[in-house]
Structures are given as structure tokens and as C-alpha cells.
């Protein structure tokens, strides 16, 4: 059966009403309604570069000016964007339900700007606005400078936009020397505090998530606007369903429902167990209706 055959809003509301422990795993599709592009599919290209190839330590090492221009542009766009009704619906769910935890892969700060309670939010891939050093442990946790530095000003210039996005328009090469250095060690470069491919997620955060999942039965997992292709985020829904593995208490009687909310149910990872739900459409429209 297709996952859409389980998409009865009233059945979903009945399950939600009974659910004490709810986990959300969010991705870029959540912020699509705020006008921010996703990574895969339409909008996943920045100039001629696949966004994925820029989100690596190797790309930053090879051309920090290019990678910084990409992130400076993303910072500028995220600052201009506003949280959408889905961010507010999740923040409101957190306030109403102490047993709700939101794991987000998004780095755009829109959950925080929607006043999502911080104890019920884990930013898996960091933040565009948390700056850190490539060499030492220096951090600047909330830096919203825009432009980030004079040489990155083209990324914050709205007037020629989308000129910056058009690969036919030349982009000035920004040499390493023109990028801000770490004020502490004076040798490293400042870099965005996001998690690139091959880099580890924060260890303590991962331990806290494992513990949260294993503590008691998770009744419902909302998988919102993510392609479910990037690990470890892609594994949390199944981890919750199986009771968190070692130490997890899977008690008889109830089952975990995985609820996929995605523009394309095939585009996000579809779950087909009998207790699952799938809702196809814009998360910005669907989540407020589902969580009201
Ligand atoms: C809508 C919508 C609308 C559109 N409404 N929906 C196990 C197996 C295989 C590989 C690995 C593994 N464990 C680790 C790895 C390696 C790697 C990995 O996962 N590789 C895969 C590609 C296979 N993982 C890592 O390297 C991670 N580190 C790690 O695990 O360290 C230890 C380790 C290292 C190496 C080996 C083994 C262990 C780190 C991953 C960091 C990911 N970082 C990025 C960049 C962050 C900075 C930045 O923003 O630039 O995070 S990559 C990028 O993908 C970004 C996103 O958070 C992430 C997920 O993407 P997301 O959010 O799902 O977006 P999309 O675009 O993919 O999907 C959007 C969805 O929305 C689609 O489904 C649309 O249909 C939908 N949609 N509009 C609702 N309006």
C-alpha cells in the first residue's frame, strides 16, 4: 500500500493526543516556505557548484574564499528570511508538551527565532551564526555580521541579485589573507560553525539524543522536510521505533508511529509500517494543521 493511504488527519490527531513522547527530525524542506533553498533537487546548486561539494573541510581548505562566499550568502538569506508557520507550530508543540524533542539539521537559526524552547531543540549540524576557528577551540556563538567581512560584501548585496547566483557573472576570488583570522590563536581562519561532511557531530549532543530516545517509549516521530540521506540524522526515526537499542525500553501495548511530512513522499524517506502516516505537501502549510 502507498503511504498516502494512512494519511487520515483524524487518525493522526487521535495518535497525537495519546502520544506522550514525540520526536521531530527536521530538514531543509521545513525552511522552504521561508524562501530558503533545499540542498538536493531544485535550488541545490549555488552558481555552478553542487551545495554538497562546498560543505566539506576539503573544499574550505582548497578555496576558503569561495566556500565563505557561499556561506556569507546563506547567512544573508537566512537573516532576511522569517520563520514560517511550521517553525512556530513546532515551538508551540514544545511549550505544550514537555515530552517533545526537536532534532533539526537546519543551520538557519529559524527555530531559535521562532522562540523554540532551547531545552527541546538540538541543532544537529550547528549554526551559520556560530563562528569557530579552524585551528583552536575559539568560538563566537552568535555572530550576525552581514557582510561578514569587507571582501564578502558581494554576498550581501541585494541589488544585483541574482547576479551573484548566475555563474556567467564572474565572482572575484577572495584570497585567504582577506578572510578574518581567529582572534585567539591568530593562525587559524574563522569558519562557519556548521558540521561538514566527514566531520563529527557534537559528541555530548549525540549522547543526550541516544539517552532521550532510550529513556522511554517514543510514541511518535515526525520526519519533516528531509530527504533522510545524511547520517546520523537519517537513523533517528528507526532508532526511536526500535526503542533506542541497548538500554532502550520498548514496552508492550503501544507502537511508535513515524509521520512523514514532505513535499514529495517519495522525496523524503517513506515509512510504510501499519501505524505510520504520510502527509504530502508544504510543511509550512501542513504542520500547523497537523499540530493545532
Ligand atoms: C519539502 C519542501 C516543503 C522540499 N515542505 N518538504 C553511514 C552510512 C553512510 C555514510 C555515513 C554514515 N554515517 C556517516 C556517514 C557520512 C556522512 C553521510 O551521511 N553521507 C551520506 C551522504 C551517505 N555523514 C557525515 O559525514 C556526518 N558526520 C559523521 O557522521 O561523522 C562521523 C563519520 C564520518 C564519516 C564516516 C562515518 C562517520 C556529518 C554530516 C553533516 C551534513 N552537513 C550538511 C551541511 C551542513 C552545513 C550547511 O548547511 O551547508 O547538512 S550536508 C546537508 O544535508 C546539510 C543538511 O542538514 C543535510 C540534510 O539535508 P536535508 O535537510 O534532508 O535537505 P535535502 O535537500 O536533502 O532534502 C529536503 C527535503 O525537503 C526533500 O525530501 C524535499 O522533498 C523536501 N521538501 N520543499 C516539505 N516546502
Image (cartoon, grey):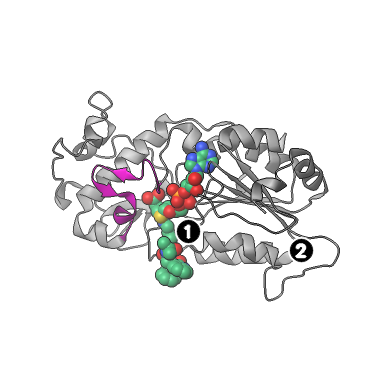
Q: Is mark 2 within 8 Å of ligand 1?
A: no
The quarter of the picture where residue 143 lies is top left
Q: Residue placed at 25% from the left, 43% from the top?
A: 69
In front of the other: 63 or 275 = 275
Q: Residue placed at 66% from the left, 33% from the top?
A: 288
Up-down relation of residue 157 to residue 277 (above or below) = above
Residue behind mark 2: 216
Q: Quadrant of the C terminus?
A: top right
Residue 238, percent across and down? 63, 64
Task: For label 2, count other residues whose C-alpha is less than 10 Å away and answer few (under 14), some (14-19) or many (20+).
Answer: some
Q: Residue furthest bottom?
A: 246
Residue 148, percent across and down? 29, 39
Q: Is residue 13 left or right of residue 103?
A: right
The quarter of the picture where residue 114 lies is top right
Q: Residue placed at 44% from the left, 31% from the top?
A: 81
Residue 173, percent across and down? 13, 45
Q: Is mark 1 within 8 Å of ligand 1?
A: yes
Q: Indicate whether residue 116 is drawn in magenta.
A: no
SS for dot 2: loop
Q: Indicate whether residue 41 is drawn in magenta.
A: yes
Task: For label 1, count other residues whose C-alpha is less than 10 Å away and answer few (under 14), some (14-19) or many (20+).
Answer: few
Q: Quadrant of the N terminus?
A: bottom right
- Comparing marks 2 and 1, which lies closer to the viewer? 1
Q: Residue furthest right?
A: 253
Amino acid at each position: 500500500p502507498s503511504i498516502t493511504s494512512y494519511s487520515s488527519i483524524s487518525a493522526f490527531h487521535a495518535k497525537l493526543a495519546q502520544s506522550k513522547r514525540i520526536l521531530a527530525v527536521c530538514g531543509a524542506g521545513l525552511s522552504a516556505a521561508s524562501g530558503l533553498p533545499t540542498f538536493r533537487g531544485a535550488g541545490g546548486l549555488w552558481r555552478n557548484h553542487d551545495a554538497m561539494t562546498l560543505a566539506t573541510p576539503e573544499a574550505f581548505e582548497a578555496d576558503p574564499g569561495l566556500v565563505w562566499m557561499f556561506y556569507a550568502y546563506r547567512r544573508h538569506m537566512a537573516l532576511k528570511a522569517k520563520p514560517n508557520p511550521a517553525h512556530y507550530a513546532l515551538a508551540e508543540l514544545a511549550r505544550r508538551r514537555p515530552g517533545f524533542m526537536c532534532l533539526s539539521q537546519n543551520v538557519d537559526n529559524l527555530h531559535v527565532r521562532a522562540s523554540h524552547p532551547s531545552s527541546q531543540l538540538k541543532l544537529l549540524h550547528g549554526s551559520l551564526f556560530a563562528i569557530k576557528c579552524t585551528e583552536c577551540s575559539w568560538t563566537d556563538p552568535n555572530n550576525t555580521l552581514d557582510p561578514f567581512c569587507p571582501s564578502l560584501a558581494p554576498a550581501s548585496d541585494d541589488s544585483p541579485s541574482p547576479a551573484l547566483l548566475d555563474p556567467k557573472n564572474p565572482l572575484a576570488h577572495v584570497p585567504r589573507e582577506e578572510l578574518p583570522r581567529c582572534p585567539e590563536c591568530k593562525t587559524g581562519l574563522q569558519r562557519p560553525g556548521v558540521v561538514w561532511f566527514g566531520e563529527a557531530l557534537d559528541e555530548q549532543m549525540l549522547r543526550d539524543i541516544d539517552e532521550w530516545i532510550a529513556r522511554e517509549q517514543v510514541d511518535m516521530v515526525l520526519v519533516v522536510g528531509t530527504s533522510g540521506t545524511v547520517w546520523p540524522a537519517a537513523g533517528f526515526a528507526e532508532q526511536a521505533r526500535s526503542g533506542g537499542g541497548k538500554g532502550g525500553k520498548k514496552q508492550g501495548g503501544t507502537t511508535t508511529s513515524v509521520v512523514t511530512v514532505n513535499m514529495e513522499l517519495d522525496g523524503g524517506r517513506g515509512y510504510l509500517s501499519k501505524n505510520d502516516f504520510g502527509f504530502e505537501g508544504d510543511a509550512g502549510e501542513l504542520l500547523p494543521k497537523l499540530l493545532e
